[in-house]
Amino acid sequence: MATLEIKDLHVEIDGKEILKGVNLTINTNEVHAIMGPNGTGKSTLASAIMGHPKYEVTQGEILLDGENVLEMEVDERGKAGLFLAMQYPSEIAGVTNADFLRSAINARREEGDEISLMKFIRELDKTMEFLEMPEEMSQRYLNEGFSGGEKKRNEILQLMMIKPTFGILDEIDSGLDIDALKVVSKGINEMRGEGFGCLMITHYQRLLNYITPDYVHVMMQGKVVKSGGKELAQKLETEGYEWIKAELGIEDATVTEEA
Amino acid sequence: MTVETKLALSAEEVRSFSQSNNEPAAFADFRVAALIKAAQLDLPKPDKTNITKWNFTEFPVHTVESSPFSSLEELPEDVKAIIDTEGQENLYIQRNNTPAFIKLSEELKAKGVIFTDIQTAVRDHAELVEKYFMTTAVKVDEHKLTAYHAALVNGGVFVYVPRNVIIEVPLQVVFLHDNAEASLFNHVLVVAEQSSAVTYVETYVSTVEEAKGQANIISEVIVQDNAQVTYGAVDVLAKGFTTYVNRRGHVGRDGKLDWALGLMNDSDTISDNTTYLMGDNSSADTKTVVVGRGSQKQNFTTLVRHWGKNSDGQILKHGVMKDAAQSIFNGIGQIEHGATKANAEQESRVLMLSEKARGDANPILLIDEDDVTAGHAASVGRVDPTQLYYLMSRGISKAEAERLVIHGFLAPVVTNLPIEGVKKQLTEVIERKVR
């Protein structure tokens, strides 16, 4: 079992504090969902875990099996087993999807132990078929000219090919039609198991109809303010966030300027 | 008043060079007349680069003698790598100024295709050469360097594709530069007659560290009505040359000319790639990639000039600048009056890898007709940190992520070169230069 621990995490962007002490522990074989209104710091949490250069951690810790993630470069975090399915994946012209994926897989392997081309192609074909992606997408340039749905599918393709220990999914459901949502969810469910832990960030309870979370957390004002099981998500769906705000005496859930 | 420049050769020397090559008397006269013009004419004025102090005229010797290759086994490894020594049926290798190897398939010979060194063409195909040599695409008296070139031509290739002949396999040319003293006044003349098709790929390889001579290179590509030409080039000339390279196309009705140019010289370089879209429905697609390094100064002008109605011109230029290299990228779409429904598009992008490097993308549209479409995109910047973050988040190291982005940026030409060895060589040159 592997564990990702986030302790008292404070994060700034351009000098403004967005996260104000997030605590969260995720184990493999668990799926956690983070919900919350817009502007409460959910995506910042995802980017800070991965090490986005614009986000500065000012306080707290992120530990992966006790190892200090904050001391690692972005690529070292990736190699250590973290994966972020991004809300807005970059487009990289001239680099084919297949070449990129092979580089990513080989980056995790020792020199001289690179994946064989045949094995790689077999796995890629199989996974693309599973995600109902047309074969030609492997030869298209990475995310270039992909529709929103194609980009999300491509993030899941990478997740399934790279097989990280922890997958963080930043609004993987936003902008997806139902068919694409089903396929993306199928991919994530396929990953579930002993070697994989997942942190899903979403606005919408609908995603959780397809991927049942083990734990649900609510973020407001840059902190996790409420945690529970999957029934918490259902309560949010029927009753909204107002009752939590009332319970905690919060008027504005978003991260405020002066803080 | 123009001050006459002292040139390296006299009229007598030019005439005696022509005679020693058994050129027709008319060609000797042509050279001498050009030499006189060269002394009087001004240098070209590439936009935004001042070349008045550059040395384009002096060199140690006009021609050097090199041994030809009796078999491809004798080729240096750098050249072997870009040739499919067994599969390549049509191949010309020039070593410095010496035609060193030539091969043309019997099938193409039987169809009337001519593929030969320029000296032989001047002698054996005088009528065709006279018709097209610096008469249609490039004119002798455009400026000092065109005239100087005409006077001193000492190498190059002639390709002639008769009417309706479709050449399926690429013709390959390698210009090997392995003598530091050598100067390259190469002239490539490609004539594709009506409804013919040909793919031509040339590579310049220097195996010496530093050149002492001049490189004054002109290519003329005549694309007659309904013909198609694809012209690929990879230039990797050593530092020390002052390089002037002019590649120009002249395209007739329904004709199509595609350029894929990998300009990887280590020398200071002025490159002019112009396509004249003369006929209605003619089209040009010009793709250029460049890597500048060291203290190189370069100017790359790509011009597509439209006379034909409904003609289509596409310009793509991608440059990577490192160290203290300086480059100007002029992209010009020019539409003449009467060229209705013409379309001129261009995209120029420069990627800067160091603080001291300079790269200017200079998009220009000159339009003298109302009923046209045109567009341009230009950008100059560093490797996008968001792209690096994305790639690195997949476990790819920063160095490898940068490598992927740069190779991707230069891929438009690499993927368009039709010969596997040349493609691979360009990739390796890029690898070496950006490291």
Image: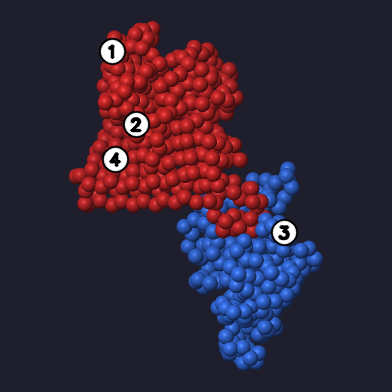
Mark 2 and 3 residues: CB-CB less than 8 Å, in contact? no
Q: Which tint was used for chain A? A: blue
Which of the two labelled residues, at mark 2 and mark 4, occupies the earlier sequence position?
2
Report which quarter residue A43 is drawn in.
bottom right
Marks 2 and 3 sit apart, C-alpha to C-alpha, by 54 Å
Query: For the residue marked with disc 3, what is the amino acid?
Result: Met
Query: For the residue marked with disc 1, what is the amino acid?
Result: Asp
Q: Which tint was used for chain B? A: red
Residue B307 position (above or below residue B37)? below
Q: Say what secondary structure mark 3 lies in.
A: loop
For this view, does B226 lie left or right of residue B355?
left
Furthest toward the left, the residue is B338
Query: For the residue marked with disc 2, what is the amino acid?
Result: Pro
Nearest-to-viewer mark from 2 and 4: 2
Q: In the rendered structure, the residue with mark 1 lies on which chain?
A: B
Q: Position of residue B41 (x, y in %)?
A: 30, 25
**Quadrant of the image for the N terminus of chain A?**
bottom right
Q: Position of residue B63 (x, y in %)?
A: 45, 14
**Quadrant of the image for the C terminus of chain A?**
bottom right
Mark 3 and 1 residues: CB-CB less than 8 Å, in contact? no
Which of the two labelled residues, at mark 2 and mark 1, occupies the earlier sequence position?
1
Question: Which residue in the structure is indicated by mark 3?
Answer: A72
Question: Which residue in the structure is indicated by mark 1?
Answer: B29
